[in-house]
Amino acid sequence: MKVCDVLDLIGNTPVVKLRKIVPKDGAQIYAKLEWYNIGGSVKDRAALYMFEAAESSGLLTKDKTIIEATSGNTGIALAMIGAVKGYKVTIVMSESASVERRRIVKAYGADLILTPADKGTAGAIEYKERLVRENPNHYISLDQFSNPANVLAHYMGTGREILDQMDGKVDMVVMSVGTGGTSNGVARRLRDYLENVRIVGVTPAKGVRIEGIRNPKEPNPSKLVNLSILDELVEITDEKKSQCFETGRRCAREEGLLIGMSSSCALHVALEKSILLGPDKRILVIFPDNGYKYLSTDLFRQ
């Protein structure tokens, strides 16, 4: 491998074929492993695009502190890129976020503000917005929930890579829905080139907490979520959440892939769809991150 810059290690993540966990006579399932991004998740892509868009526009200067509300992975990505580029970063996160996520953010040198767990990510967003209003000359928010660069990162990157890696042969894509950046960008790219591809989004049912994704019907919904571009939105209830987590643990035991919470939910739905589609079809599922940040959570506590 040629010597490269740290940020060159964002994008071009691998796709692997799942072999043991897939139902007999089910559709083939391929997984895109987004933890191969240098910061460990799919959020590296959006964070870099948002950083560079703000730099190009002149809005981001070294005297400003970047502030973002996040459930974890975007905060990690911004902290990492801020360290590389030399920017101060403050991350606002719910106390419900795993201890691993908090420690990683701080390890990259970012400041961390925790908000009450019972208010979830919505509470973190509200607190971040108040800080920006009160300190407009100090903070700049890249705002992953409304920034078009979030979508563009996946239209230009993730979606293009999927088409190349799968040789344009994809019958269905299953991915979790959080900010809407990944789902919107990937769906738009694939629909530009594949007439019959089905796009399935996965989100928690209203009131259900799953780190990394949130129901678009919750308070302060992301402006980037575009439900009309999806063929189906599968909501994960508390009962189904337990099934998804068991699927995630099976993936580690059977495929050697230690996957995170939203990845486990997406895989569970992909397995259900595999049975319906049959063996001559191909499903691509996006794994946003691995399971290392969830070892202290219910996903691996059993």
Image: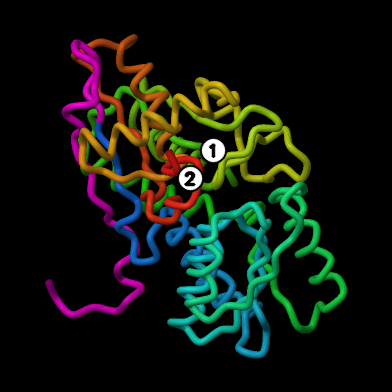
Q: Point out residue 279 in the picture as x, y percentages from the top left corner.
A: 20, 13
Residue located 53% across and 81% down the image: 109
The tag earlier along the polypeptide, 1 or 2, is 1
Residue positioned 44% across, 61% down in the render: 44
Q: Quadrant of the C terminus?
A: top left
Viewer-nearest of discs 1 and 2: 1
Q: Which residues are magenta?
A: 1-29
Q: Nearer the viewer, residue 223 or 204?
A: 204
The x, y position of residue 127, in whole percent, is 79, 62
User: In the rendered view, does 163 fall on the left or right side of 235?
Assistant: left
Q: Amino acid under label 2?
A: Thr
Scheme of colours in the image: rainbow
Helix, strand or loop for the magenta stretch, by majority: loop
* Numbered mark located on residue 182 in the image: 2
How would you rate the neighbour count of disc 1 (Cα within 10 Å): few for under 14, some for 14-19, many for 20 or more? many
Query: Horizontally, is 116 left or right of 297 in the view?
Result: right
Q: Give the position of the N terminus as an image quadrant.
A: bottom left
* Left or right position of 71 against 187: right
Q: Secondary structure at mark 1?
A: loop
Q: Residue furthest left?
A: 1
Determine whether 43 is above or below 119 in the image.
below
Tell me whether circle 1 and circle 2 mark residues in contact (CB < 8 Å).
yes
Please indicate whether residue 169 sits to the left or right of residue 34 in the image: left
- Mark 1 belongs to which amino acid? Val
Q: How far apart are the two marked residues, 1 and 2, measured between alpha carbons? A: 7 Å
Instruction: Say the numbered circle drawn on residue 212.
Output: none
Residue 236 highlighted magenta (yes or no): no
To which quarter of the image does residue 16 belong?
Answer: top left
Considering only vertical position in the picture, is 165 above or below 39? above
Which residue bears the numbered disc 1? 177
